[in-house]
Amino acid sequence: MAKSISFLLIAMLACFNLTAQRGNIWCFGDSAAMDFNGGTPVPSSSSVLSRGSCVSIANTNGDLLLYAHTRSGAGGVITGLIYNSTNQLMMDGDSIAGGGWYQEMVIVPNPADDSSYYLFSVGVTMQFGLMYSLIDMRGDGGLGAVTQKNIQLMNILMVDCILAIKHGNGRDWWLLVKPSPVGQPTYNNTWYPFLISPTGITAMPYKNLGSLNGTNIGKLTLSPDGSKICFINLGGLIELYNFDRCTGLLSSTKNIEPELSTGPYPYYWSSEFSISGRYLYVSSSTVPWSRLYQFDTWASNIAATKTLLWQTAVPPYTIGALKRGPDEKIYISCAWVQPNGGYQYPYDSTMYYTENMNLSVINSPDSSGIACDFQPWSFHLGGKRTYWGLPNNPDYDLSALAGSPCDTLVGIGETPQIQQAFINVFYHSAWGKAFINASNLKGKTGKLLVYDMQGKVIHSESLRIQNRYYTKDLSMMGKADGVYLVVLETEQEWLVKKFVVE
């Protein structure tokens, strides 16, 4: 029995991340889509036609609810569109704020209403600043309808980056935007957070922090546990910030590379963390080189760990967005660009090439250097095409911060919220320990099991649950490098998480 159970667990592990569902459908590029619900992603189709900005959200079963994108807005034209699950334009889903940039939109569930969603947009070269539209999924017979459109929250130009982060209480959301320094030089290191809660959208105090930013083209990336944010820009800036999911505060910056005062610039385009948060991947799109780099953020000197994983000179400006999938691999979008460096948007009917018919994949992002197994143009999009963008979807399934000051939703006049059980495992190589944390557990007692990839139990012990929470510092000293599986069994549930020893 134990052998069959372990075999089943390993098979499940090889297939998919058990907790991710609301981000399982990606819609992007030129009518491209990917469905992660079966574990291994399957190419599909959508109505998107965007060189960059795109967002999508599924329900808790992984079924697509809605998606949106922007088209290039030459002449200051508002170009955002929202589609329903049938790939048709949603009722009143046209003329949504957006100008055809790359990270200018994000969808956030409304904490006050399970059937409604906010779509936030920033204006990079259009003065609308920060706007939101409200979508009610009860409209149009359950396909959804836009009930409020382009409600303005700020009226200044923004950097092409907007980030949504699940609050530490597991219900509310933080929204982070950055004003553009172009024509607004006092905004070169300013951050504006907003709190989205059942009471609405609340502007929080702004903060000046970090290095000066001289461009309106930047990108924000959140670490898998929500504690770190990376900001990069075309001028060469790579900077890490600590983020507090309870307070929404940024703090304690680490400057990995400074912004250059003169060219040639590296044109850092996108970044993404590995699932442990250790490795940071950064794309660079210049003439004549497209490049992919890896940094080790656990190193004392992060900049010194910079490793060039890949570069290509034909065509230039090829590499674009990086996005970690529900399967924990990192997918990279590359546009097809003409050999002279010019690009055409939209593509014409003849422009089908390796670069735009496939995504590149980092198969083992938590491994150092070439062991990460980067495979350029290795995921075929089923005949569809991509540009530079991938969905700017937040981690909709990020759990509450168990044991933190904000891990409870119970307050005056509130009733307790039912939260899904969650397990997280973090391995620290220097200490040789796996830190196991589980929250929202049912029952009082259970068992902790750790399997190697051959299905052998390498550790077993009884456990006691206190206040629905369990934590364990497990020594892995002497254990071989490789993937391990943590199984937490209680009287009522069964949680599984993998981690890597290296």
Image: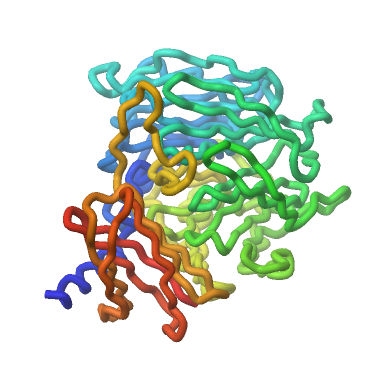
Q: How is the image coloured?
A: rainbow
Across and down, in percent, residue 358 comes to: 46, 55
The extreme left residue here reads 1
Q: Quadrant of residue 293?
A: bottom right
Along the viewing direction, whichever of 312 and 205 lies nearer the viewer: 205
Across and down, in percent, residue 156 comes to: 70, 21
Across and down, in percent, residue 372 comes to: 52, 70
The extreme right residue here reads 262
Q: Decide: is 439 above or below 62.
A: below
At x 30%, y 61%, the residue is 496
Q: Decide: is 145 above or below 206.
A: above
At x 52%, y 21%, the residue is 201
If the image is split into quadrants, where does the N terminus sit?
bottom left
In this rendering, would 250 be left or right of 113?
A: right
Residue 161 visible in the snapshot: yes
Along the viewing direction, whichever of 482 and 204 lies nearer the viewer: 204
At x 55%, y 22%, the residue is 202
Residue 42 visible in the snapshot: no
Along the viewing direction, whichever of 332 and 112 lies nearer the viewer: 112
Q: How many marks?
A: 0
In this rendering, would 57 be left or right of 159?
A: left
Along the viewing direction, whichever of 176 and 83 lies nearer the viewer: 176
Q: Decide: is 205 above or below 305.
A: above
Across and down, in percent, residue 428 comes to: 52, 69
At x 42%, y 23%, the residue is 198
